[in-house]
Image: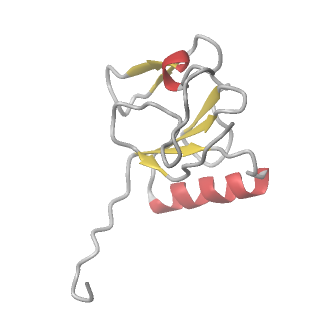
Amino acid sequence: MQKAKVIHIVPDIAAEVLSPSETPARIHRKLAQYFTAGVKEVWLINPADLTAEIWTGPNLPAPALSGQDSLTSALLPGFTMPLPDLFPEPESPVILGFCPIRVGVQLCFSTFEIWS
């Protein structure tokens, strides 16, 4: 492994799944790190209140998505995901070690935690 090469890839989109223990300061620090690294868009996914925010820079996001809103991105033409499809049904079992979110595209997920 010492001779292994590291390939540094910066995703266009990073999806941050917020855990109940996240603090606003920590979230803003992560956002700054993403945008400094060259990420073009960050999706903040909040399973606690079933919302998502789309950040395109370190300042203010677009209004939060909730209810029947759909997650879309100019970086993924034609992609749309209704928020109800993003979050599992409350009665769905949560399997330890898996993120409780269904996403059909490859994105950078930086937090995988289990909520109950």
Q: Is residue 28 above or below residue 2?
A: above
Left or right: residue 24 versus residue 108 is: right
Residue closest to the eye, 74 or 96: 96
Residue at figure coordinates x 57%, y 61% from the top left: 33
Q: Quadrant of residue 91?
A: top right
Q: How many marks?
A: 0
Q: How is the image coloured?
A: secondary structure
Q: Quadrant of residue 43?
A: top right
Residue closest to the eye, 100 or 92: 92
Which part of the image, by quadrant, shows the N terminus?
A: bottom left
Residue 64, image x and y in percent? 67, 26
Q: Is residue 58 above or below residue 5?
A: above
**Residue furthest out toward the top:** 68
Residue at figure coordinates x 50%, y 33% from the top left: 101
Q: Quadrant of residue 68?
A: top right
Residue 30, image x and y in percent? 62, 57
Residue at figure coordinates x 77%, y 56% from the top left: 25
Residue at figure coordinates x 55%, y 35% from the top left: 94
Residue 59, image x and y in percent? 67, 45
Left or right: residue 115 versus residue 70 is: right
Which part of the image, by quadrant, shows the C terminus?
A: top right
Residue closest to the eye, 107 or 60: 107
Q: Is residue 87 above or below residue 60?
A: above
Left or right: residue 57 versus residue 106 is: right
Residue 92, image x and y in percent? 55, 24
